Image: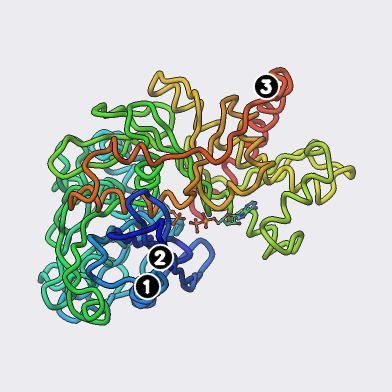
């Protein structure tokens, strides 16, 4: 509910995430006024496959927007703009005449395009994709997922070539529906989301015809690439049209880029790391498009209207919070995620055990789809409490590897790491992180940095905030952890971790 401290007007933001969709209403100081959230089904048709029902997601998005507005006790006139942020890479194709998806969305974690990526590597070469798109060939990205839909769903290639089908990541799907759907919905994406498709040329910021042809995706089904902060259209029609019709839809950012923005990492070298299902460390590299030689992604940080593009380096870790979920749901060793900390605190150390959760292969800095999970160093001494430690340490060591790669590629030493996401409520993990990366770890007051970033971008687009300086003033520290680990112990432990990582590689044979 609004009160005297949160007088309007407001900006709303939608976060269409991997496990849920949420909407948050913010005031001018970047404070949360209301939140509504709804989970959607995770569909696992085969080992390694992960899908979402995009129709369910759109229904949930409408519900949470209506829910957040109702909880705030405000109306359309109080909201100056709405921004979008989203799980990235998750790929959908739908019919522009009916609004019906041709298939479930293929989620970023899905590994069904591994073989296709290997084939593209053999036929076209890794280097070409890296050079033009900033990305290594991996099943993580959207382009190969689109190709899979074109090849494997009946009639889809013909309908796409006839111009009846639209491709989009979840930003595009939500914006198209919000702005009218079959009745003139805008078919757009922003530069950050486009930079994760493997179809956009990072040098021109346009679809790369040759790359699209080599992957086998017709460019006519791709959305128009726009900046991250501008008015794409207005809320039109349907349930939300009645409630919020006319409100400008004014930003789109992939969720990790939105978190960079929400953490106000506006200067070159500033870095954030978000700890959710997976973990994503992103460094602002300003106007420098840095080629990574250490296994990071070169990506777009953001682009505000017609200002210059801000680039970024990213280290993506597939499994962090989801390892805690696995300990809870598959192993039954804890009953809530928070219990991992209580259990880990019953022992002094990991008892010699190291857990490398290469469940979907290894992402950054290795990009090895043939890797699978390993628990190394087991003896009869090891208890479930030691494993709980090893689980938390896995997140911290994976971050350390990315931090090392960032320093190598950018030449910038990490002086502080701004963190956010669900796992940051774990104090032991945050201390371990500071110890392993050997830098202070800081968490802001508003932990919902993803939605905040989308709200900030939308607010800038409509003049609700004037500049990024206005936004910096809103960032406030809530907690800080400083390193206190003996360097010799850290180096010894790091070596053992790297040895355990080695053990995960080559588990899958080429034909698997
Ligand atoms: N206290 C905790 N300790 C460790 N992990 C936690 C804790 N609380 C939540 N998590 C993990 O954080 C993740 C949820 O964080 P969230 O930021 O909501 O993720 P996402 O946005 O990716 O859905 C879950 O994977 C959960 O296991
Ligand atoms: O929805 P999240 O927070 O799990 O983020 C997913 C990432 O965008 C995948 O690249």
Q: Indicate the quadrant containing the N terminus: top left, top right, bottom left or bottom right.
A: bottom left
Colouring scheme, one of rainbow, by chain, secondary structure, one colour: rainbow
Left or right position of 286 against 72:
left
Quick one: which residue is furthest to the right in this view?
380
Residue 36 or residue 490, whichever sits in front? 36
Disc 1 under 8 Å from ligand 1? The reply is: no
Residues at circles 2 and 3 in contact by the CB criterion of under 8 Å: no
Left or right position of 439 against 189:
right
- Please report whichever mark, 2 or 1, sits nearer to the chain's N-terminal start: 2
- Please report whichever mark, 2 or 3, sits nearer to the chain's N-terminal start: 2
Q: Which mark is residue 2?
A: 2
The residue labelled by disc 3 is: 491
For mark 3, give the secondary structure. helix
Q: Is residue 214 visible?
A: no
For mark 1, give the secondary structure. loop
- Which residue is drawn at the image coordinates 26% and 26% (left, top)? 288
Residues at circles 3 and 1 in contact by the CB criterion of under 8 Å: no
Task: Give the percent coordinates (x, y) of residue 384.
Answer: 81, 51
* Cα–Cα span, label 2 and label 3: 51 Å
- Which residue is drawn at the image coordinates 53% and 35% (left, top)? 442
Crowding at label 1, few (<14), some or many (≥20) Cα neighbours within 10 Å? Answer: some
The residue labelled by disc 1 is: 73
Quick one: which residue is furthest to the front in this view?
4
- Please report whichever mark, 3 or 1, sits nearer to the chain's N-terminal start: 1
Q: Quadrant of residue 496?
A: top right
Q: Quadrant of ligand 1?
A: bottom right
Disc 3 under 8 Å from ligand 1? The reply is: no
For mark 2, give the secondary structure. loop
Q: Is residue 472 above or below residue 104?
A: above
Task: Give the percent coordinates (x, y) of residue 467.
Answer: 23, 39
- Which residue is drawn at the image coordinates 33% and 56% (left, top)? 85
């Amino acid at each position: 509910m609004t009160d005297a401290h949160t007088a309007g007007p407001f900006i709303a933001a939608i976060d269409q995430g991997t496990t849920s969709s949420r909407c948050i209403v913010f005031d001018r100081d970047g404070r949360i006024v209301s939140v509504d959230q709804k989970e959607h089904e995770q569909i696992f048709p085969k080992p390694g496959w992960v899908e979402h029902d995009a129709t369910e997601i759109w229904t949930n998005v409408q519900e949470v927007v209506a829910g957040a507005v109702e909880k705030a006790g405000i109306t359309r006139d109080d909201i100056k703009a709405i921004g979008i942020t989203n799980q990235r890479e998750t790929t959908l194709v739908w019919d522009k005449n009916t609004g019906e998806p041709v298939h479930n969305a293929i989620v970023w974690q899905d590994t069904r395009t591994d073989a296709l990526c290997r084939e593209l590597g053999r036929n076209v070469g890794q280097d070409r994709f890296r050079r033009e798109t900033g990305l290594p060939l991996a099943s993580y990205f959207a382009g190969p997922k689109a190709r899979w839909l074109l090849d494997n769903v009946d009639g889809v290639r013909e309908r796409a070539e006839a111009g009846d089908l639209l491709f989009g990541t979840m930003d595009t799907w939500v914006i198209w529906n919000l702005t009218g759907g079959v009745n003139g919905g805008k078919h757009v994406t922003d530069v950050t989301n486009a930079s994760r498709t493997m179809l956009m040329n990072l040098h021109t910021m346009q679809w790369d015809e040759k790359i699209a042809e080599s992957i086998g995706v017709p460019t006519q089904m791709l959305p128009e690439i726009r900046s991250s902060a501008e008015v794409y259209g207005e809320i039109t029609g349907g349930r939300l049209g009645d409630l919020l019709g006319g409100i400008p839809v004014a930003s789109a950012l992939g969720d990790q880029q939105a978190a960079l923005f929400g953490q106000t990492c506006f200067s070159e070298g500033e870095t954030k790391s978000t700890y959710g299902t997976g973990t994503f460390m992103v460094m602002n590299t300003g106007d420098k498009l840095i080629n990574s030689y250490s296994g990071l992604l070169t990506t777009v940080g953001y682009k505000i209207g017609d200002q210059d593009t801000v680039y970024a380096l990213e280290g993506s870790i597939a499994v962090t919070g989801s390892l805690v979920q696995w300990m809870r749901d598959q192993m039954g060793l804890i009953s809530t995620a928070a219990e991992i900390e209580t259990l880990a605190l019953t022992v002094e150390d990991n008892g010699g055990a190291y857990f490398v959760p290469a469940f979907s292969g290894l992402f950054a800095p290795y990009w090895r789809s043939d890797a699978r999970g390993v628990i190394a160093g087991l003896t009869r001494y090891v208890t479930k409490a030691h494993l709980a430690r090893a689980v938390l340490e896995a997140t911290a060591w994976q971050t350390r590897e990315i931090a090392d790669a960032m320093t190598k590629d950018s030449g910038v030493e990490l002086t502080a790491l701004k963190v956010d996401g669900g796992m940051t409520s774990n104090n032991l993990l945050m201390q371990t992180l500071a110890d392993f990366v050997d830098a202070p770890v800081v968490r802001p007051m508003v932990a919902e940095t993803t939605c905040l970033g989308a709200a900030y971008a939308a607010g800038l687009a409509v003049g609700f905030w004037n500049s990024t300086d206005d936004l910096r003033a809103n960032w406030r520290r809530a907690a800080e952890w400083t390193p206190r680990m003996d360097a010799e112990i850290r180096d010894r432990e790091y070596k053992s971790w790297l040895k355990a990582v080695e053990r995960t590689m080559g588990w899958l044979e080429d034909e698997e």
